[in-house]
Structures are given as structure tokens and as C-alpha cells.
Image (spheres, rainbow, N blue to C red):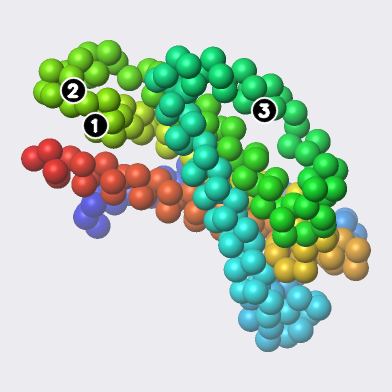
Amino acid sequence: MTVSNWKVDYIGFVLPALIFTAWYLVTLEGGVPAYLIPSPSNLVRVAVDFATGHANLTPYAGTLLVHTLASVQRVAMGFGLAVAVGLPLGFLTGRISLAKSSLDSTVHLIRIIPGIGWLPIAMVWFGVGENTTLFLISLAAFFPIYVNAAQGASSVPPLLIRAGRMLGANKLTIFTTVIIPASLPSTLAGLRLGLGISWAYLVLGELTGVTYGLGAVMMDARMLGHAEMILVSMIFIGLFGRISDMILVGSFKRLDLLREENKE
């Protein structure tokens, strides 16, 4: 995309601007106590101090990188495990009737159980901390990945399958060159949902007692009465979650471009 045809969608800035204006007005001149909703300017100062540590405004000054790396690592590991299990099972369930009859009912039965309902038994199985967090992330992310992969695989037009067979493709080749590529839109939707859920359940897991992580900062800040740090942590979680989503979508677009180039 060239600079000349690059455009900014200003409509997307309307809602954030309205929220920011309302936030500024309700905190103006102490209209709302700072311990409930800190002012935008104070929040910016705390966020910068969280990243740089230049002013030591809170006990968390200069620790953003440490906590971010811990959280990103947990999301990557939990999401990666969900992908490694959910995609193959989803593709198999979508195309093989035996796999569907064997797995699908059980998976959907487990899926109905709220993710937070797994927290007590996860703490019994894995203890408080790291392993419980990874379990919750991978379990929660598994279901949208599995369901969308199965839906995508089952929706591949039979004409494509027949065309692959006419060209001499065996069952494995049809899976890798026809079914999986044709399922990419649904697969990407499932991966994006799973990645977003991974960030949500990261917070749940880190609230259970890990030392480092943005969710751990939120819990610790609540206990110490630093409302601004709770909001700052929430903002950074949303920011890093959005960045990871953009990386995922960009990777799929790049993969699609490579496929088109290979066809040519």
C-alpha cells in the first residue's frame, strides 16, 4: 500500500474521544474521588512511570517490561498449546465422521462449563500460580479454535475435494492442500477468538498468586489501593492483546499472499 492511497478512518476515533471527554469531566476538580477514578493526566503519569521508573510514583515504577514479558510468555504458551491440540482435532472432527461421533459431544459438553468454574479444581490439581494460569488459558482458548476449525473443514465445497482427487491427490494431500487452505477464514476467526480469550484468562490465572504479570499487578494494586495502576494494567493488557491480534491477522495475510504467488 502506497502513502498516496493510505487513509485514516477518523470515525473510529469518535467513541474514544467521547469516552475521554466524559472521563475528563467527571474527574475535573475532584468531582469523583481519585481513589475511584483517577484523572487522565494522573493516569498518563503513572503509566509513563510504570514504563520508565523516572518518578517512582508507585511501587511498580519501571517494572512494565518484567511484568509484560511474564504475561506474554504465559499467553504464548497457553495459546500455543490450545492451537496444537485444537486445530488438528477440529480438522479431523470436521471431515471424519468417526472423529466427530467420538469427540464432538464430549468437547461441547465440557465447553458449556464456565471457564471460571475450572479455577477451583485447577488450583487443586496444579496449585496456585504458573501451571494453573497456563491450564486456564489453554483450556479456554481451545474451544473456539476447535469449533471454528471443525466448522471450516466441514464447510469445504465437495467440488474442491473431487477436483483434488481427479488430480491424483491422496487423502493426506487433500487435507493439506485443499481442506486446510479452504478452511483458513474460519480457522483465523477461531484463532482470533482464542487469542482474545487467552488474554482474558491470563488475568484470571494471574490473580491466583503469581509474582509477575500484568494481572498480578492488578491484584496487588487493588490490595494497596492504587486504582490508577489497576486501570493502567488494564490498558496495557488491551494494547498488547490488540497488537498480538494484528500480528496474527498480518501473518495470515502474508501466508495468503505467498499462496497466491505460488499459484502464479
- Mark sitting earlier along the chain (2/3): 3
Q: Amino acid at mark 1?
A: Thr
Image coordinates of residue 254 in percent, x first then y, are 29, 49
In the image, which disc is placed on residue 164? Answer: 2
Image coordinates of residue 143 in percent, x first then y, are 59, 32
How packed mark 2 is, by other alpha carbons closer than 10 Å (few <14, some 14-19, many 20 or more), is some
Q: Secondary structure at mark 3?
A: helix
Identity of the residue drawn at 51% across and 18% down? 100
Q: Secondary structure at mark 2?
A: helix
In the image, which disc is placed on residue 111? Answer: 3
Identity of the residue drawn at 67% across and 69% down? 67
The answer to whether 102 appears left or right of 19 in the picture is left
The answer to whether 32 appears left or right of 198 in the picture is right
Identity of the residue drawn at 42% across and 53% down? 247
Q: Are marks 1 and 2 in contact (CB under 8 Å)?
A: yes
The answer to whether 110 appears left or right of 230 in the picture is left
Q: Amino acid at mark 3?
A: Arg
- Mark sitting earlier along the chain (1/2): 2
Identity of the residue drawn at 49% across and 40% down? 191
How packed mark 1 is, by other alpha carbons closer than 10 Å (few <14, some 14-19, many 20 or more), is few
Q: Nearer the viewer, residue 143 or 230?
A: 143
Q: Nearer the viewer, residue 142 or 15?
A: 142
95, above or below 68, in the image = above
Label 1 to label 3: alpha-carbon separation: 31 Å
Name the residue beneath numbered marker 1.
173
How packed mark 3 is, by other alpha carbons closer than 10 Å (few <14, some 14-19, many 20 or more), is some
Label 2 to label 3: alpha-carbon separation: 34 Å
